[in-house]
Amino acid sequence: MATPRPRKIFLWLFPLFLLATILSVYIFSDQLTGFKHSVSCNAYNFEFRRGLAEDLREIQQKVRKSFLHKEAPSPKLLLQLEEIVKRLDPEVDLASVFTQKGTDTDSLDVCPEVYNGTKFGYPFYEKGWELINCTNVKPLRSVVSVLVNTIAYPKQDENYVETVIKGITETYPTVQVYLATGSVNVMKAAQNYKNVDVVLVDKAQVAKGWNILVGKASTPYVLVARDVFHFTWLTQLERQIRVISQIPYVEVAGGSYRNFSGHWKAGCVQTTMKNYVLKYQEGYLHSKNGCMLCDYLQGPFVTKTSLFKLDEKLPIQVVFEDWFSSIIKKGSLVMSCPDAMYFTTDYWSYSKITDRNVWTPLAKKWELNQVLLPGGVKHSFSCEDIGVTCKAKSELLPLCCLQEYAYALAFFQKFAEAHNFTFELDTGSALGGVKFEGVLPYDLDGDFIISTSGIDILGKTETVDYFQKNGYTLADYEPKKGYARLFFKKFYFEIWRMGDMSNKRYLPPELQKQETYTKANIGGYWINTAFSPGLFSRNRYGREILKHSQSWIKLGLSHSFIEYSPGGFELCKKPEHHACIHNFPADGNIPFMVN
């Protein structure tokens, strides 16, 4: 499908706008540094410029991604740019991405609200903002339905269900409630309320229960009232509907929550899915109308009915994590308004923290090697756990492959020491040690050279069997050529015989023993490498060796000795993947780090 002409123009102009922003940073910063009142002022200016440079680098990568994918930039990206411009000049008046939608005077979803001043609610401030009486508002029953799923409630908590239903019907007597339960007693109690439609669902099918409920709703919005044990006017349902209906791109709005014992949380979480890692961090970076911009909500929320559908194949503990990841990826915005408060109890937080197995299906679906939760909790998953191999594609190698690469080299080095032969990292593997303290994360294979006695040992049947028992395959052995390959998980090392090692030739005589060879830190293991790996790599690859370039095979070059032109990556086959290589900068190693 052809890109619309205005969108094409925007895609071309947006990088120019970004360049103008960058130039303004330096102009403004140079003006600041002209006022050298003190050393501390200069230090502040340096940190200010450095912080802006880091933010702009991140934005540049996102702009490049949008440009390559022929997509309009995300609303979040525009918010980041707004934030930078505001930091440069707080008085500038921008047309915000959050400019409210024009209201249709014939049909509002909910009435507007007005602030009555700082003294109106004194002294307890249970009021302050009030709805304006309006005649052009739709009936609330035609705007929103309430979904309550109590399938997973333990038997001792079933008594709260009627409290919830009663609270909803008293607060919003016209709104339709759809209730899923696994209890006959709850079903009978709910039948006493005329606006409650009850569905009996098997206890093991919690996600299916949510999908059944949303399928019954005919309103444009639904309140997903998960894990609620009470319901009052504090929910501020109209507030959340107003946020979705009036703020562009916002499709989910929730509130804060408190539990039985009174512990309160805003419930706003930021997520980052990048390079096989999903990280959760509580807090917010942007806000509008007193609501936080979030990626994940810990409590109940209002959303568009057409948007809400859970993956029934996943454990119930992580179905909402999956759903939020999916809608964020599609460009939806999520907000949490802390002045709206729910009464909830979290039945799943303990298992999510303590049991990595509940995360494994989600990790497999999204190809994640790590899930990082607030509070420093980390769940790790192997290549086998998530069903990936180490065969290089157009994405970066999974983290588990980087670890397996280090394990393989450590295993080989231990074997070499035990059998008294020498080897060194060569070509791309030596360069990987210099740039990444490991394998080049976009490489196709590993490389090392081995002494003549070593290549002979690799050809022995007992050596092949020993490696096989430890999960490695020695293959393609050619004694005359002095060549072999070592395989693991569809990744391989090319092994070449060399009459001498560089450490034997160029180190001082007293350092030419194997135990004093130059060693590179490869994933936490000290592995023999070239005598001076930085010098070796610069002489081998030529210009700008610290910038990145994919393998000569990927680039379609005729052989590996053609001089590379580093500084860019080929386009990915799956550009939306969180480890798509062309979404990463072609310089530096820090952007590739995951923790």
Image (cartoon, helix red, strand yellow):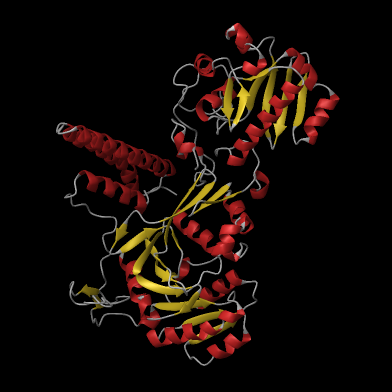
**Which residue is at 55% across, 71% downward?**
211
Q: Quadrant of residue 523?
A: top right
Work out which residue is located at the far bottom of the displayed protein and give it: 192
Q: Position of residue 244 (x, y in %)?
A: 35, 67
Pick whichever, 558 or 392, lies toward us.
392
- Residue 201 shows up from this direction: yes
Locate residue 515 relative to residue 469 in the image: left or right.
left
Q: Image height check: is 397 above or below 215?
A: above
Query: Is 201 displayed left or right of 113 in the figure?
Result: right
Picture coordinates of residue 423 (x, y %)?
A: 67, 18
In percent of the image, x 54 and y 64: which residue is there? Answer: 349
Q: Nearer the viewer, residue 462 or 145?
A: 462
Measured as percent of width and height from the top left, residue 503 is found at 61, 12
Q: How many marks?
A: 0
Q: Position of residue 240 (x, y in %)?
A: 36, 71
**Front in this rendered view, residue 330 or 44:** 44
Note whether 284 is above or below 414 in the view shown. Answer: below
Residue 218 in sight: no
Q: Is 510 left or right of 465, judged from the image as shown?
A: left
317 with respect to 119 (left or right): right
Question: With respect to residue 224, does 446 lie above or below?
Answer: above
